Amino acid sequence: MGNRSVIPFGPQHPVLPEPIHLDLVIEDEKVVQAIPNIGFIHRGLEKLVQKRDFTDYGYVVERICGICSYIHGMSYYEVIEHIMGIEIPERAKYLRTIWSEMSRVHSHLLWLGLLADGFGFEALFYQCWRLREKVLDMFEASTGGRVVFSVNTIGGVLKDMDSSMLKSFVDIFQDMDKEIHKCCDIFLKDYTVETRLKDVGILTKENAVLLGAVGPTMRGSGIAVDTRKKYSYAAYDKLDFEPCVAYEGDSFARCLVRIEELYQSIDLIRQAVDKIPAGDIITPYKGKPNGEFMFRAEQPRGEAIYYGKANGTNHLERFRIRTPTFANITPMLNILAGAQLADVPILVLTIDPCISCTER
Amino acid sequence: MSKVLRFAGTAMKNFFSKPVTTKYPFVPCEYTPATRGRVVIDVDNCVLCGSCMRHCPSLAITVDRDKRTWSIQRMGCIQCADCVNNCPKNCLSMGNQYFEPGTEKVEESFEIPAKAGGASAGGGGGANIPVKGDDCVYCGLCAKKCPVEAITVDRAAKSWAVDAGACVGCGTCVDSCPKKCLTMGGGEAAPAAAASPAPVHGDGCVYCGACAGSCPVAAITVDGDAKTWAVDAGSCVGCGTCVSTCPNEVLSMGAAAAAAAAPAAAKAVDPAAAAAQAAIEADLPADVPVQLDGCVYCGVCAKKCPVDAITVDREAKAWAVDADTCVNCGTCVASCPKKCLKMND
């Protein structure tokens, strides 16, 4: 038995964009146990639901996190719409789907960049973020915001995309597809990347189930579950896709799942643009919500659960979000136990941690 | 291709091509027409309805109807466009230029010019001083009961007059009239001083629903599609918030619901209640709000309190402040539509 010591990791660490603290119990170079500590950026946004009108709180939900912004906002409105029994127009459903998938593309490209940065491949990091910039430009042209979109409302969406804009987006994604292929080939085939990702941080299928992993972390361990497919929302039931899976359970598998999802998202956008019907984008509504509803959505990081309880007044009683990162922290600790100290930053990154979401 | 030097092609291409970044600030950034940069106000159309202020999720907008100013904290604004989407007059819009970054928090204030004719014409509806009906026998009871001696009755000359400037709109005269010939419904006193008459609805309503949104007790129902407007006199507390909210100034405090006015009047003369009030004031530490006479239990103070220190029970006509929770901010005093709160001294 070697020398045991405790190394603090975070909340400030070059590899982490957001604060999470881990106490790493190490034996020589090997991590024996990791003890997490979160709560550095709690902002009390869930409590704010009792102070803001239900019509205005959606803008607060969107600002919980900059990367998951779109799906957070959309899910809040889906909860309210389900409570009030509002059926949104078909076109709005398709628009929500398109924007959801665009946000998945930008989130995964951001993550790939961070991963490259994590193992010191700066040039690849810039390459990924350069591609991501195009998605942000498309978001700005269609919604008016680059990061926080504020384009949803109760009963539908506020902005429409005309056919020429949709077509130009598909063309841009067509070009991007080639560039993403070129860029992602490096992740999948380069020797340097391989040594850092292959056979490192294995999460077995049993552990993934047992510890409640979600999203690409779970699908990287061979579980083919996707909330978009299983609890279909927006227009996903009309699109043709299968969950992306990898079976090895190591860092490379989680990276592979996200790369596959990039192509899948681009394909879903193409399908949605082909099928999008003409018509209204918003259904007028009356009254105030009364009741409760639980909604699941597939964030880029995995399944998020939204619970809303309304009491017939202007303010909701409760709005609770179970974020994917929160569910993935336990599997992450499982991955960390037994890893080399030098691999810890990469392993923390492979669950795609989003601490702002987790702490709200 | 081999496992090494996979990035070499991309690297060489980047090495010989132009940079993908622009030379900001020498080359200015281009925004799309849809970009939400900052909130722009068209001062000529603004009617100071305050809808933007009530909706703003980050509380960045302040509308002051008395000073006729519309102010926005530029650094507090989150560019969500909620104010723009809720503006009944469409005088707000999103410009696509961002506000310049800086080291200080900037608050921009805009003067809203008074509308020619509009304000005075609308003000004429502020009806909450008593008017005499045909059944008057000039008994003079109203003049006797008036707490501010605003009414003059001359039995000989059969004349009845009210001094609109002195009248506080309490409704005591209406309650005391033996012939029940008085109603609240005339004059031009300030709406905030209304006793408990329900609002009445004049011509020119656009059914925007601003009044319904502002009502502290949700007594007003507006249907924009069916173009109907209704007030539930039973729930109305007569606070006058709707009148001051109405962007088109078509609302006024009208016909007195005598029954509704009664509790407020009764409360004012009840010595036991006054004594209890004095005891409460003596008990409370300095700098927490105390409730004075005139409270209609509308609950606006409780709603506005940032720390939920105030409890208002309309049924039981009870008002209480938790001195331990109170942070002495004075928000309740500023928000009280009846101006019946003050900070204990």
Image (tube, rainbow, N blue to C red):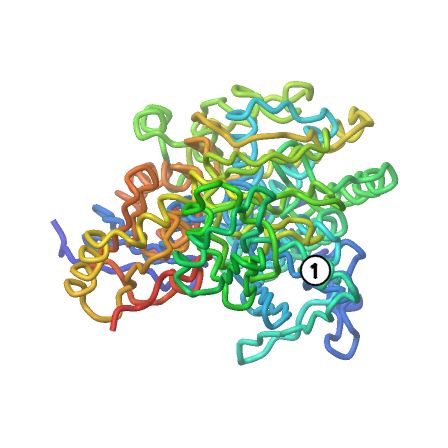
From what the image shows, is residue A222 above or below residue A301?
A: above
From what the image shows, is residue B174 above or below residue A231?
A: below
Residue B98 in sight here: yes
Q: Nearer the viewer, residue A60 or A148?
A: A60
As drawn, is B165 to the left or to the right of B301? right
- Residue depicted at 61% across the width and 60% down the height: B188
Q: How many marks?
A: 1
Seen as rendered, the residue at the extreme front is B156
Residue B1 position within the rendered picture, expressed as x and y whole percent measured from the top left: 68, 44
- Residue depicted at 35% across the width and 44% down the height: B263
Residue A163 position within the rendered picture, expressed as x and y whole percent measured from the top left: 86, 36
- Residue depicted at 36% across the width and 33% down the height: A203
- Residue depicted at 79% across the width and 40% down the height: A161
Element at label 1: loop
From what the image shows, is residue A345 above or below residue A158?
A: below
Seen as rendered, the residue at the extreme right is A164
Report the residue marked by disc 1: B47
Q: Nearer the viewer, residue A358 or B16?
A: A358
Chain ID of residue with mark 1:
B
Residue B138 position within the rendered picture, expressed as x and y whole percent measured from the top left: 51, 51
Dividing the picture into quadrants, the one containing residue A17 is bottom left
As drawn, is A193 to the left or to the right of A309? right
Residue B193 position within the rendered picture, expressed as x and y whole percent measured from the top left: 49, 59
Amino acid type assigned to the residue bearing label 1 in the image: Val
Dividing the picture into quadrants, the one containing residue B280 is bottom left
Residue A341 in sight here: no
Dot 1 alpha-carbon crowd within 10 angstroms: few under 14, some 14 to 19, many 20 or more: many
From what the image shows, is residue B291 above or below residue B101?
A: above
